Amino acid sequence: MKKLSLALLIPLVVLSAQDKGLTVPYEMFRLENGLTVILHEDHTIPRVAVNVWYHVGSGHEKPGRTGFAHLFEHIMFEGSGNVPEGMFDVWLEAAGGDNNGSTTTDRTNYYENLPSNALELALFLESDRMGYLLDAMSPAKVDGQRDVVKNERRQRYENQPYGMVWIVMARALYPGNHPYSWPTIGSMEDLSAASYEDVVEFFKKYYVPNNASLVIAGDIDPKTTRSLVKKWFKEIPAGKPVEPIDPPAAFLASEKRLTMEDRVQLPRLIMAWLTPPAYDPGDAEMDIAANILAGGKNSRLYKRLVYEMQIAQDVSAFQWSAALASSFWIVATAREGHTLAEIEAVIQDEIDKLKMEQPATRELQRAVNQFEAAFLDGLETSSRKADQLNAYYVRTGNPDYFNEDLARYKAVAPSDIRSMIQTYLRDEARVVLSIVPTGKKELAAPNSSEVKP
Amino acid sequence: MRKRLTLAIATAFVLALPATSQVPDRSAPPALGAPRPLQLPAIQRFKLSNGLPVVFMEKRGVPIIQVNMMVKTGSAMDPSDRSGLASLTAAMLDEGAGALSALELADAIDFLGARISTGAGAHTSSVALHTPVSKLAEALPLMADIAIRPRFDVEELERLRKERLTSLLQWHDQPSTIASITFSTKLFGPRHPYGLPGMGNEQSLRAMRVADLRRFHEAYYHPNNAALIVVGEISRGELEKHLEAVFGGWKGRTTATVNWPDAGQVEQRTVYLVNKPGAAQSEIRIGRIGVPRTTKDYFPLVVMNTILGGSFTSRLNQNLRETHGYSYGAGSFFDMRPLPGPFMAYSAVHTAVTDSALAEFFKELNGILKPIPDNEFEKAKNYLALGYADNFESVGQIAGMLADMILYNLPDDYFNTYVEKVLAVKKEDVERVAREYIVPGKTLVVVVGDKAVIEKGIRRLNLGKLEVLSVEDVLGNKPRL
């Protein structure tokens, strides 16, 4: 938040490409109905990326309707007032375009990647569903996508080895009334209960221009694009302001130790903690801590568990950054003949070491260098730039936050890693979940109580 | 957070845009102007002093560079008792090379922020470097060590052997992996290079020795059997200097060419039901042997497959996902390789509707043999032609396209003439290739799912001979460490 106001003092019209470092020049304006629009020119190939964020995710759902934000995302592709069912995709494909959308706890995005001559088609389609979705809505459409989403849940969770981990962990990490305590995909019962009326209400509340931001990046002429955006979007009326979520505090009062059986060959240990929200102090430090623990052969956990002891098949660690509260995960799969107790002991030992002694300078620099290179990769395609411009705008108010974001990583000192690990990776405030092959509870980490998916 | 944001942003925005008189006409999608053609930098070809060919595209914009070494030999050359050798050789390249141990090497690469990956397919092996241009001079010698001077230390081999045996064990958990392996094993048979998983099996992995790896590397990794593909922000002069310094001294022999056996085509429809008790979905694979990449029917086939199962609005996806709600997605592809690869239609469907889904698959496979409506034909051609530029945005993508160009001896103007070739495809050719290559009555059908729930319904469809298999029948027994 500190950097936010600073960034906003810079005139947000056109940033010069001569600025040092990573910069993605853009123009930003807002329509009278509140729609924020961000334009970025890149003529590398004759394509354009159109990227819309609605500032609503599964975190805005009501209990009993979990999975609704994501179900709604599917319904957005089923036609609108002037787009017959099925034609959204047909028209885009006939123009050489692809499209998709995704839903997280915090937001829902929609995007089209298409030849630059077809930009207006994307604007027509996006504006039509923003303005006139309900003119073409029917209970049958809701039913159709309900089935597709249930199949998505089967394919991505239920029929995947270890696939139910995400669902169990969300429940264990957050208090029951916290909006992150249910999974974005939702439960089968709630998906069955979602009604046509829910769709109408959700659309009117959240799918309003003042709750959205539109990025257009690629082979565009900004002046023409600006007038095309106005042409298609300005007639859509503003909705009521959307109240920010007022979540209960996310905290773990004690360590939770859980075991779940799954149809798998090998046991897997998942340890997770609650950490600072995206872009808050501590967020970049935990990203780097994840790399020091499990990024690459020389990372502490990989080196010990996989390379030297060879008791684990894999280990990974990551900071899952989110708007209200992030989480930090360590995941390791034990090899045959080894228990999760052995794995946990090594992980515990390595965390304890980082609490006692800060990482070496080179170790930290190796991690930061990898993050820096990854920033360059993010600038290669218009679609990635478009989504990042939108993400930065939503979280910081400054679409071109690339340099500032990278600066967060470069500013981290070895002692910061130690102190953040001391603060956030506490033994008495974590979830330790053992996934064991059916009938082999003895492989679980000790003192775990059984949990069902 | 949003409240404070809105307040701050209001002052910074350019407000009160001049009103425009344009009123959108929503009665039809807007008319579109002519597409702008894709203009790629020239493809430059040269050779290093040792004869190693280089294909280079200078791409400006982001200071990143991709350097891929392609070795024109892969798992198709695995000895019959050492299946998995090409893959294991490639995996061992960066486990210690030149003066550096596995850990030292990984540390050096990671410290640069570079990535070097190694791998093997059926006909190629590769070492791929992706790095900021500023680190190229330091990263290239590491890449050269990996490609040319791997150590093949026995301790590292033992470690990777364990890792791979464990991966084989984990395949038993993965219905989609089981389905794909069943399909290729049954389609090509164990003696054809496409009939075995590139990773090998338990017996071959246990038999692998350091000497096998050395022999494979010495036989195939040399400048006469390799090429470098480079895409990125660098001038040709500077690039040549860098490449010559690290690869110019690499010497080697020539490699003999080999003829592979033909795989027998499917003559009789057969169903393989692999039992996975309790599965929430059934994984379906249907297909037969398709075509090599060099087929004269390449363009009509690509258009035909786009209509059948190559895009979101394709018939298979529309039917199984949108119309019936059986699946999260369905599709089909021709895997075109130097030898005829598979044609495959695929999906994962809700267990309870497995038989109905199979019936819909065959409805579509038969339906594509009938005359194709003009609008569907035009949509598919436009999707391919107008979407083609999307393959040329990142250095990694372009390097991948150039690799195909080398492997299949495509002409230098191939990328620039692709669009016109797609648009020139005739509908009668699309209909002809559908009849020639789809042949729904002569296909293999693989279903991985809960036998207790799905067997009866599948039998009722009378698709052909049905054979029930266990996961162990397909993958072998679970390896023990």
Image: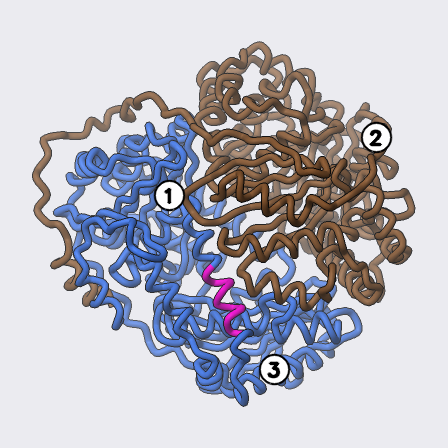
Residue highlighted by disc 2: B257
Q: Which mark is residue A111?
A: 1
Q: Which mark is residue A350?
A: 3
- Residue A15 at what x, y percent from top left? 24, 51
Image-based side of B297 in relation to A153, left or right = right
Instruction: Using the image, determine if residue B128 lies above or below residue B308.
Output: below
Q: The chain shown in blue is which?
A: A
Q: Residue at x 80, y 26 (%)?
A: B266
Magenta segment: A363-372
Q: Secondary structure at mark 3?
A: helix
Q: Residues within 10 Å of mark 1 (few under 14, many from 20)?
A: many
Q: Callout 3: residue from which chain?
A: A
User: What main secondary structure does the magenta stretch of the protein show?
Assistant: helix
Q: Secondary structure at mark 2?
A: loop
- Asked if badges 1 and 3 are on one and the same chain, I answer yes
Q: Which amino acid type is marked by label 2?
A: Thr
